[in-house]
Image (cartoon, rainbow, N blue to C red):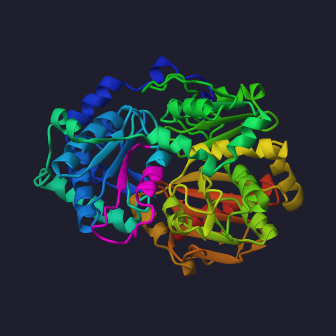
Amino acid sequence: MTSDRAGQPAQLSDLVDVPQLVSSYYVLTPDPEDVDQQVAFGTSGHRGSSLKTSFNEQHILATTQAIVDYRREQGVDGPLFLGADTHALSGPAWTTAIEVLVAAGVTVLVDSQDGVVPTPAVSHAILRANRGKDLGAKGAGLADGIVVTPSHNPPGDGGFKYNPPHGGPADSDATKVIAAAANDYLRRGLDGVGRTPFARAITQVGRYDFLGTYVDDLPSVLDIDAIRDAGVRIGADPLGGAAVHYWEAIAERHRLDLTVVNPVVDPTWRFMTLDWDGKIRMDCSSPSAMASLVARKDEYDIATGNDADSDRHGIVTPDGGLMNPNHYLAVAIQYLYGGARPGWRSERIGKTLVSSSMIDRVAADLGKELWEVPVGFKWFVPGLLDGSVGFGGEESAGASFLRTDGTVWTTDKDGIILALLASEIQAKTGRSPSEHYADLVAAHGGPAYARIDAPADREQKARLSSLSPDAVTADSVAGEPITAKLTEAPGNGAAVGGLKVTTESAWFAARPSGTEDVYKIYAESFRGPEHLAQVQADAKALVDDVLGG
């Protein structure tokens, strides 16, 4: 249920107690037999809160040692790039990780300016270090990385994710091994975990210019000259996250008319407007969380927001306000594949199966192959690496795309280049992305899209994640015959961890949450909001029936 304070400024009572949060990181000890206090990797690493004993020093000691063991087994012996965002727990976890990595003899590279580092800058650094190398070779000096971030999660959360030599999020094969080893270390009281005191460890790390290298390379993936020459007025809001100094550097080095709307970094995020549920959350795709920037939309040609680790983007235009992430993905695909990147050889467009079917229609109109994969950016990594997928995007406002010459840029989500692409579209076409979306609606119809959550316990979520198509006995949804029942993604045959059902003009997908006792229903209809409501109702009834009520 939406809070009546959604979109309103945060109050003192909404703020996290940072000293208590940090103290709990060191003081509280997780119970290794309590599933809620174990290391668990979701689609983007291990996340939790020190206050709930789900993200504490022992977790990071154990997880870092497990990563050390894993990279050793894989023959990864090059440097490890270590980045972190501005969450209060990121600093302590970053410190803990260094202590373990240095004790293990890993060459650790941290930011040369002792600054925070966005996720895309770490992916960019890994790929740059591994350029021209065989990523499957052992002992080849391959680099990898860790990013300490819970992404857009509330200020009280912490996060820790591993990026192997391919530069993208670790796949489930890797994370299962790492999580199992970490939990084993927890059960053994951290026996076997090495540690060097931080005062000594920090003197043994190397330095890397994440910001300068990333910012200087932007003209290889975007038409920066066009943005500057057109004089596009850009307002960039880092939302208190890791992109704050990157946007300043982008404006200066590339001489853009770019204003950092809010340069404040505060671990309580007291300057935020509350998200839909009344919580502080740095979700740049949420109208409630982005209310402050939306209120200033007329001051800029393009205004953009990023989440705390800058892997997500939000696009605000004077004529359209905050664009729905699905709408912007469709526009970006139409623009990039419609002639803006003649150097690409890619014929594939990547999307997650809960992203809008508008992308399907755009792909068909362009004559390109649609590559539909399960939720999680890790699925796009192989295609982005070899250039066969020019663009990979997901409905939660995460995407990346190739350099102009058709080679890989990042294999993790990059909210900075997606934000700048909106300005390139404005510069090269003279029209905003929201105006371009209106053209797509005129050509293909206007879909209604929404996501709802429904209660589900751990057993029900496990049942949903392992469904077979035969479990669905219904033959229609919202008055239309079912055309497909999918538990595997069409693009790569991977299990979707749930179910997707399609009809001629609509679809829904149901999948369990990795962090809450709910399942999520994504639904879309090209027949309008009323039909969408019918789809949602039928979807919930169908899934509840499968789950036994």
Q: Quarter holding the N terminus? A: top right
Residue 17's x, y, as percent? 36, 24
Residue 424's x, y, as percent? 73, 44
Looking at the image, is 142 positioned above or below residue 347?
above
Which quadrant of the figure has residue 41? bottom left
Which quadrant of the figure has residue 535? bottom right
Q: Left or right: where does residue 83 sit relative to residue 294?
A: left
Residue 549: in sight, yes or no?
Answer: no
In this rendered view, identify the residue nearer to me: 92 or 405: 405
For the point 85% across and 49% down, which residue is it? 438
Residue 273: in sight, yes or no?
Answer: yes
What segment carries the magenta color?
A: 123-150
Q: Left or right: where does residue 134 sit relative to residue 239?
A: left
For the point 24% across and 67% down, which residue is it? 73
For the point 79% across and 38% down, which residue is it? 320
Residue 130 covered by magenta stretch: yes
In this rendered view, identify the residue nearer to me: 444 or 451: 444
In this rendered view, identify the residue nearer to me: 385 or 175: 385
Q: Residue farthest to the right? A: 442
